[in-house]
């Protein structure tokens, strides 16, 4: 029980209690530990200049690891003295990574010297650790934040708490040389300008035995507008005008004004015993603070390059006499070290800002690739990033009108939420209203440059307004950057807009926006740096990067919009094509109502079928007969109505060209049907392969234009650009077939399962692509080898694919196996198509066609046919005879036709010989 001896409970005085507590420190400590709470502690911390502790964070919470259900609150303390971090098992979880990071920060793993044992567990260290721990725990638990904080820890050296002023004064009186080394060491590792200011103020006050001190840093370039800025407000007399507080809570003094401005400008030391008698002195600060300035010592701080980096000032020597030459000598010596420390801190600050700027630019790039569907959203995100990094009140993007060289088609304007204590957006709205009024009254300039305006944030993002921006118009015209430090003194700025809107424009930076071809597509403009300074060269470089990204974003968004429009046009075109390429229900019912003769009646099952024996409608019914006789309508569950409409649609989608038309497609399908029945191929193919091959024959030349793949490549046709130069037409035929199949009323695969559908589409694609002769030449050697060996593994998918490819080519060129009258008629149709292509090559492409396409060399047709038979047809059908003797009639047809062509070629040569003799 603590008693207060000598004090009456009824009439004690506060001074008596304080006196008793001073005499009994143990009792005071016991009462404080029992009664004090977090609010009292925070008040004490705030009063003594420390950062208050957050109520929700306590040592017990940090020590117990409350975020981890498996952590033990009673775990032993780390042997290195980390009272805030219990030991835990090694884990790769993000939470433990965050704990390990905070723990490494607390241990000062980057220290350059070992602090004393007393300072190792100082209150300031613990307070910094708690603050960093709170910051770390408040971040979202993702890898990017962890990486960002780890990078931060790598580039920032630790700062150690400075000793209090009283202790420094004691050390100075005890050993002045050791004290000087301590205060030099005190600033040697500090890379924060604010912390460095605090330490320098305290150190130079003790060093010169002054009452108060101030340090002002130089900002701005030597040949530009420089000023003195203080990170901490202390009593700093001698300024010409009252310093203005900027947005980052620093104090700014104009260059050359007052005593400090004089010292910075003239690089001289000013030592005054009676400061209030100096003409450069102004006592406004003294009158505001109630402080009296007597003596004053002001000195420039220089770096290793002899440039002024700061100005230090001490006032009121404690002895009341004034500062001596010895004080000047001591302060000058110490400030030489301070100049090095300030220079290092400024370099580090510049690198830190550059790191943040680069990170922001990377975020801009991320935004560009993340959002490309909307031009408005892309520009809004870029302006938000630009405003955040450049710290300006307004950011605008004005897009050039494609139909005019001097007009803007759209304006985007983003305002900072608050400026000068009022809403910046409200001023912009007044300015827009003013612009609309000028437009309505018929201002010539605004009539010629009227444009819609999109302002964000705004309730009306697409209001039809006109800003009447002369600066942006000038940039659009000259294509050069404009940087105005004082807008109202520049004749290019329209001051009337500020007068009406109430918005004050101080500085403007305006740059052109270019696309990937270097053409101007718009103008970007930022207005008024938040700190009140004009835009400098660094701002120009940074804004240049933003305009580049803005140009990329606008270009990508515009390309996306063009692609979206093209896709919409394609959808409409497909709808129109589907309508006009489709068939009427009456045609379908007409075919369904007719009797379909059996296959032998039309000789569909014969290898010598006459290709010209059926008309167009008969060929459609014959197609239905082939599907039925192969059992495909039942096994693949194909409805007759759907099959009829499918065949009629396929017929309608063939163009009216000489050879590659609907009749050719039907003849190829008929030959495939006949080989399956006559040559025993049906037993080697499953139902899905039979279905895909029959459909492939019917669709293998859909929408053929009468020209070959080489012509598509030579003419750089749309098909070549779409499908490339390899099997160009075959890819087009397949895609056209898929379009028909994907139509609900003509989808003959609709009743297949998903696995069956996928399988038949895959076989169909390979079947149609196999009709490209260049691909046939690549695989036929493998087929010849398979036949020579006489053993084929039908379970091998690759060999089955080769077998189907060879079979498709066999049917595609099967006209050479038909009787002579049919084969000769087909050859004439093929040559007609070839000659038409040769004529196009001469007239359109201005090139000499190949011999078999040159109309002037048509007398060479027999020789060309012999080369075609000997090079392609005869080896192919001979291999089929080796595979199965039932193909012998086809080979015989080839040999008979070859004999006819050989006779015609001999007759041609004989005529040429007779002609030569007559000439001789």
Image (cartoon, grey):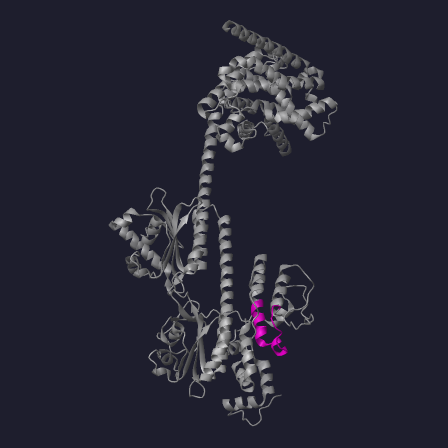
Q: Position of residue 820 (x, y in %)?
A: 59, 10
Q: Is residue 603 above or below residue 742?
A: above
Q: Is residue 239 above or below residue 693?
A: below
Along the line of sight, which residue is nearer the eye, 857 or 253?
Answer: 857
Location of residue 387 (image quadrant): bottom left
> Would you say residue 350 is visible in this rendering?
yes
The magenta-colored residue range is 109-133
Question: In the image, is 114 to the left or to the right of 534?
Answer: right
Instruction: Considering the whole magenta stretch, tell me its main secondary structure.
Output: helix
Q: Is residue 159 above or below residue 899?
A: below
Along the line of sight, which residue is nearer the eye, 807 or 547?
Answer: 547
> Would you say residue 47 is visible in this rendering?
no
Q: Position of residue 801 (x, y in %)?
A: 66, 28
Total labels drawn: 0
Location of residue 66 (image quadrant): bottom right
Q: Is residue 641 above or below residue 122?
A: above
Q: Position of residue 504 (x, y in %)?
A: 33, 62
Look at 47% across and 27% down and name the residue there.
579
Along the line of sight, which residue is nearer the eye, 369 or 915?
Answer: 915
Along the line of sight, which residue is nearer the eye, 381 or 543?
Answer: 543
Q: Residue furthest front?
A: 920
Q: Is residue 496 magenta?
A: no
Question: In the image, is 889 to the left or to the right of 459?
Answer: right
Q: Quadrant of the N terminus?
A: bottom right
Q: Position of residue 6 (x, y in %)?
A: 56, 95
């Amino acid at each position: 029980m603590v008693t207060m001896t000598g004090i009456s409970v009824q009439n004690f005085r506060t001074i008596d209690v304080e006196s008793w507590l001073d005499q009994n420190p143990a009792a005071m400590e016991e009462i404080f530990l029992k009664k004090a709470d977090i609010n009292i502690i925070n008040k004490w911390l705030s009063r003594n200049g420390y950062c208050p502790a957050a109520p929700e964070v306590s040592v017990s919470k940090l020590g117990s690891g409350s975020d981890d259900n498996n952590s033990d609150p009673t775990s032993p303390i780390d042997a290195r003295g980390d009272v805030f971090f219990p030991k835990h098992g090694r884990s790769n979880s993000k939470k433990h990574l965050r704990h390990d990071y905070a723990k490494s920060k607390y241990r000062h793993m980057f220290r350059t010297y070992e602090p004393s044992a007393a300072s190792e567990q100082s209150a300031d260290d613990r307070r910094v650790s708690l603050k960093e721990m709170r910051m770390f725990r408040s971040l979202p638990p993702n890898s990017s934040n962890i990486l960002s904080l780890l990078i931060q820890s790598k580039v920032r050296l630790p700062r150690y708490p400075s000793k209090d002023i009283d202790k420094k004064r004691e050390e100075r009186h005890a050993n002045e040389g050791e004290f000087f080394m301590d205060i030099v060491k005190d600033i040697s590792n500090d890379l924060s300008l604010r912390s460095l200011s605090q330490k320098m103020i305290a150190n130079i006050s003790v060093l010169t035995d002054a009452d108060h001190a101030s340090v002002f840093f130089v900002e701005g370039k030597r040949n530009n507008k420089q000023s003195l800025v203080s990170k901490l407000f202390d009593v700093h007399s001698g300024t010409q005008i009252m310093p203005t507080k900027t947005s980052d809570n620093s104090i700014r003094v104009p260059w050359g004004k007052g005593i400090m401005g004089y010292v910075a400008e003239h690089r001289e030391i000013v030592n005054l015993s009676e400061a209030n008698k100096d003409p450069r002195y102004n006592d406004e600060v003294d009158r505001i603070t109630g402080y009296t300035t007597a003596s004053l010592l002001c000195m420039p701080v220089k770096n290793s390059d002899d440039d002024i980096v700061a100005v230090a000032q001490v006032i009121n020597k404690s002895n009341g006499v004034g500062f001596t030459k010895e004080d000047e000598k001591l302060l000058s010596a110490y400030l030489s070290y301070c100049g090095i420390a300030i220079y290092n801190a400024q370099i580090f600050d510049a690198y830190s800002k550059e790191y943040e700027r680069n990170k922001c630019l990377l975020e801009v790039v991320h935004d560009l690739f993340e959002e490309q569907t909307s031009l408005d959203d892309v520009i809004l995100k870029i302006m938000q990033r630009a405003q955040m990094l450049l710290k300006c009140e307004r950011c605008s993007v004005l897009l050039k009108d494609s139909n005019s060289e001097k007009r803007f088609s759209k304006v985007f304007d983003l305002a900072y939420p608050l400026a000068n204590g009022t809403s910046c957006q409200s001023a912009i709205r007044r300015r827009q209203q003013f612009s609309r009024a000028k437009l309505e009254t018929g201002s010539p300039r605004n009539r010629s440059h009227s444009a819609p305006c999109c302002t964000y944030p705004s309730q009306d993002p697409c209001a039809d307004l006109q800003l009447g921006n002369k600066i942006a118009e000038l940039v659009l015209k000259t294509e050069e950057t404009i940087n105005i430090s004082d807008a109202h003194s520049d004749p290019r700025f329209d001051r009337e807009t500020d007068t009406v809107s109430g918005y004050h424009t101080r500085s403007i930076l305006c740059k052109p926006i270019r696309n990937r071809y270097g053409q101007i597509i718009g103008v970007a403009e930022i207005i008024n740096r938040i700190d009140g300074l004009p835009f400098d060269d660094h701002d120009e470089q940074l804004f240049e990067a933003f305009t580049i990204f803005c140009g990329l974003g606008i270009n990508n968004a515009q390309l996306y919009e063009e692609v979206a429009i093209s896709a919409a046009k394609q959808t409409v075109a497909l709808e129109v094509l589907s309508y006009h390429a489709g068939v009427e229900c009456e045609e379908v019912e007409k075919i369904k109502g007719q009797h379909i003769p059996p296959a032998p009646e039309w000789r569909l099952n014969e290898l010598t079928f006459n290709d010209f024996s059926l008309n167009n409608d008969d060929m459609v019914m014959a197609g239905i007969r082939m599907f039925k006789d192969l059992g495909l309508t039942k096994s693949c569950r194909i409805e007759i109505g759907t099959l009829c409409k499918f065949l009629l649609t396929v017929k309608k989608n063939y163009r009216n060209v000489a050879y590659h038309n609907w009749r050719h497609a039907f003849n190829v399908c008929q030959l495939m049907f006949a080989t399956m029945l006559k040559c025993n191929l049906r037993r080697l193919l499953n139902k899905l392969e039979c279905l895909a091959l029959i459909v492939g024959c019917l669709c293998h030349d859909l929408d053929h234009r009468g020209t070959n793949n080489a012509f598509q490549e030579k003419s750089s046709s749309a098909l070549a650009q779409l499908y490339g130069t390899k099997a160009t037409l075959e890819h087009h035929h397949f895609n056209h077939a898929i379009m028909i199949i994907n139509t609900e009323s003509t989808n003959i695969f609709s009743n297949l399962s998903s696995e069956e559908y996928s399988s038949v589409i895959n076989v169909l694609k390979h079947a149609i692509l196999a009709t490209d002769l260049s691909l046939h030449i690549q695989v036929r050697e493998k087929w010849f080898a398979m036949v020579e060996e006489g053993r084929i593994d039908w379970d091998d998918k690759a060999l089955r694919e080769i077998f189907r490819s060879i079979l498709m080519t066999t049917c595609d060129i099967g006209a050479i196996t038909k009787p002579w009258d049919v084969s000769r008629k087909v050859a004439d149709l093929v040559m007609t198509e070839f000659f038409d292509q040769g004529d196009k090559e001469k007239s359109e492409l201005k090139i000499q066609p190949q011999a078999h396409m040159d109309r002037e060399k048509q007398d060479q047709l027999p020789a060309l046919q012999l080369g075609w038979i000997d090079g392609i047809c005869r080896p192919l059908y001979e291999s089929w005879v080796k595979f199965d003797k039932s193909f012998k009639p086809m080979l015989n047809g080839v040999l008979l036709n070859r004999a006819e062509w050989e006779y015609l070629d001999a007759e041609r040569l004989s005529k040429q010989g007779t002609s030569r003799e007559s000439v001789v």
